[in-house]
Amino acid sequence: MPLVTMNEILPAARRAGKAIGAFNAANYETAVAIIQAAEAEKSPVILQVYSRMFGNGKAEALGGLLIRLAQKCSQPVALHLDHGENLEQVRNALDWGYNSIMLDGSRLPYADNVVATAAAVRLAHAAGATAEGEIGHVAMGDATALTEVEAACQFAAETGVDALAISIGTAHGYYQTEPKLDLERCRQIGERLPDLPLVLHGGTGTPMADVQKAIACGITKINVATEFQHCFLKNVQAGLDALDGKFSPIDKFMDAPIAACVEHLRGLIRAFALR
């Protein structure tokens, strides 16, 4: 089916008290795993491509592949620029067929974040796409700055974002210690913004019980990159170890890592949908 925007899947999920997985594709194999998992679970899904790949030229070619895979999928699929660094990346994403974007201004002073994000929102909406912004900063490790409730409400009103990433104690990458989510903060933001899908970055390694409590507070889009891509690499390494120096055609070799990732993603999709 044709690509859908986040507005065609996230608001309904928010009303139903569920969340949709947003998984980062980096190549054909990870993309196929995401699509196959969505098909198997009969669930919408968000394909994400990280901003780094927009800086090295890979995102244009990969985007074409992802669009084709999405069109062949029977489930709703959105294609999203993850953590866009500037308006040039936003424009490129829209030109290349991505129908959802994020400009990450969370490291900027509040006023600059509003200006940058609002400009990205205007570009996205003019192209018929949807836009995500972030207030508060989800960092690597312990440098996270939690989102203030009033700032979240003001930011949403001033930028017009279709989805809002908030910082409630998660971090990108693997944790050194178990995270403690500020679920009360999440609840307050969700109550103040009852119609706006909220986004949780740093889904890797967060206890699922806490993730599901956050979903009950309004988290509707959950980003997972490190955990998913580590699953892929771990299974590639296991396959190489099993070959023990022997040859295998690459397309056949990749079947096992893809299958392992599909099962991993299916579990996440079910958990996010509270199934």
Image (tube, grey):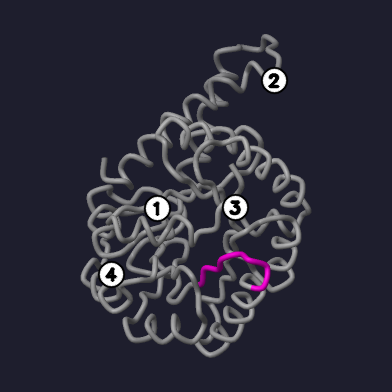
Residue 68, relative to residue 113: is it above or below? above
Q: Which residue is mark 1?
A: 203
> Mark 4 falls on what kind of element?
helix
Image quadrant where one finds the N terminus: top right
Residue 224, relative to residue 125: is it above or below? above
Q: Residue furthest top?
A: 246
Give the numbered dot on residue 79.
Answer: 3
Q: Residues within 10 Å of mark 1 (few under 14, many from 20)?
A: many
Structural distance between the alpha carbons of marks 4 and 2: 45 Å
Q: Which span of residues is magenta-colored?
A: 126-133
Which callout, 2 or 3, points to the residue nearer the camera? 3
Image quadrant where one finds the C terminus: top left
First in sequence, mark 3 or 1: give its number: 3
Structural distance between the alpha carbons of marks 1 and 4: 15 Å
> Mark 2 falls on what kind of element?
helix
| Quarter occupied by residue 64 | top right
Structural distance between the alpha carbons of marks 3 and 1: 19 Å
Give the numbered dot on residue 186.
Answer: 4
First in sequence, mark 1 or 4: give its number: 4
Q: Which three-letter amino acid code belongs to the residue tagged 3?
A: Leu
